[in-house]
Image: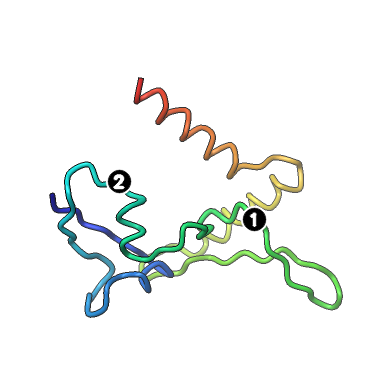
Amino acid sequence: MKVEVCLFATLGRYLPAGVSGDRVTLEVPDRTTVGQIMASLRVPEDLDRLQVNATFQEVLAVPVRKVTIPVAAGRNLAVLVEAAVRNFVLNQRGIDSTKEFIERQQKLMDEGQS
């Protein structure tokens, strides 16, 4: 089976050598999982694309939350920054939007399998 894999922004470094652009077509056996494809591309399992674990950087001896925004051509930086700020405000209020999103997606996937 042929699968087209698109790896944008910082994930592009995991594309096979010699690939131009942000996508590659792979020939994989039937019933290959996304995890197996990611492993074959050597994408680390613990890669935190949704930044579930916050990182901090000290500025003038004050810890400031650090967010890495994946920048790529054609992406709307204003929307990305606004989303990061909204997520920060929600976190300050005790709402973990990333966790809720993951739980909601998992619930929908579980319902689809039954």
Task: Give the image quarter of residue 54.
Answer: bottom right
Q: In the image, residue 67 lies at what x, y percent?
A: 62, 64
Whether residue 80 sits left or right of residue 113 in the image: it is right
Task: Look at the image and tell me in which quarter the C terminus lies.
Answer: top left
Residue drawn 40% across and 69% down? 72
Q: Nearer the viewer, residue 21 or 72?
A: 21
Q: Is residue 48 among the parts visible in the rendering?
A: yes
Task: Give the image quarter of residue 10.
Answer: bottom left
| Above or below, 28 relative to 16 | above
| Above or below, 101 relative to 89 | above
Tell me the CA gap for discs 1 and 2.
Answer: 25 Å
Which residue carries the number 2 mark?
A: 33
Q: In the image, residue 74 lies at what x, y percent?
A: 36, 66
Looking at the image, tell me whether mark 1 or mark 2 is earlier in sequence order: 2
Which residue carries the number 1 mark?
A: 53
Q: In the image, residue 61 lies at what x, y percent?
A: 86, 75
Task: Give the image quarter of residue 113.
Answer: top left
